[in-house]
Image: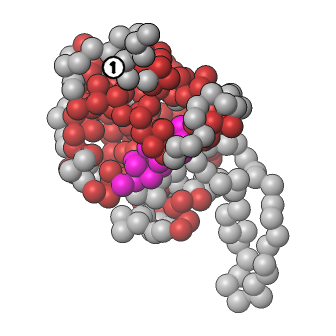
Amino acid sequence: MQGQDGERDRHGARNGGDRSPGAPDGTSARASAETPAEAPTETPAEAPTGTPAEVAAEVPAGAPDGTSAGAPAEVPGPEPRRGRPRSAAAERAILDAVIALLEAGEPLAGLSIERIARTAGVGKATIYRRWSDKEELFVDVVRDMEPDDPPVSGTEGLADLRVMLESLRTRGLAQRSSTLLHNIFAQMKSHPKLWNEYHGTVIAPRRLAMVEAVRRAVAAGELRDDLDVELIDDLFVGPMLVRTVHRPDAPLPDDLADRIITALLQGLAPAARV
């Protein structure tokens, strides 16, 4: 479909860089905290596939140095990262593989790390070095398909709030124009672990950023200081969420964020009669 193809082409061109959440030594900080049930064992069968140069780029630094098992163990100090950084092409191939499988009609619940690795042309170890489980991978796939969060000043109040409201509107437009993205969100909500991962790593930080913008607006005298800041935030975000989530047929005009802010600042009571 046109919406799906448009999303693939745009994101493939936009996200050529490496956004991997790795720790400085080349391993995944999140993966180190939990060993997945499907995590590969250290056998040659699980080594990354590809050319020797690609494999060298995927092997994390600090591999065993070949000392004998009976030698006294030494506690190594921190070492600078060696070798080349992780392959951005491998990460791009993994994200594209998930998108391709979803476009082919595969449900999220039916995707396995093994199937994704085979489609991407990498080893399972390559995936597990970046994501500790499928939920983390799927959240990054959704992030990849959504419009980027715009930069905000971090010092302004209402100005930053307007930028974030506009971002919420454009994400709503993206879901409407992409059948694939719409279907992914529908499936995510029926998988509590996946939805909780998305909520905790994406939605919650966005909400916190908006509440902080409201605090700055209150401190700057742009908003009342006698109301709970979270209530004020809900009053701004609520109308946009109704339009983007609960009323998929409602218009999302370019000036919607400005209209919401203006209506709230002016209030809903009629003008006093002289």
Which quarter of the image is occupied by the C terminus?
top left
Q: Is residue 90 above or below residue 69?
A: above
Q: Which residue: 44% across, 31% down?
A: 236
In front: 41, or 17?
17
Instruction: Name the secondary structure under disc 1.
Output: helix
Q: Which residue: 42% across, 39% down?
A: 234
In the rendered image, residue 2, in percent from the top left (x then y), is placed at: 25, 13
In the rendered image, residue 5, in percent from the top left (x then y), is placed at: 30, 17
Q: Is residue 98 above or below residue 242?
A: below
Residue 197 counted in the magenta span: yes
Residue type for callout 1: Leu
Report the side of 104 relative to 237 (left or right): left
In front: 173, or 182?
173
In front: 35, or 212?
212
Residue 104 counted in the magenta span: no
In the rendered image, residue 158, in percent from the top left (x then y), is placed at: 59, 26
Q: Residues within 10 Å of mark 1 (few under 14, many from 20)?
A: some
In the rendered image, residue 185, in percent from the top left (x then y), is placed at: 27, 38
Quadrant in the rendering for residue 259: top left
- Please give the range of residues in magenta: 196-211
Which quarter of the image is occupied by the N terminus?
top left
Q: Is residue 96 visible?
A: no
Q: Is residue 267 above or below residue 215?
A: above
Q: Which residue is tagged 1?
A: 173
In front: 230, or 131?
230
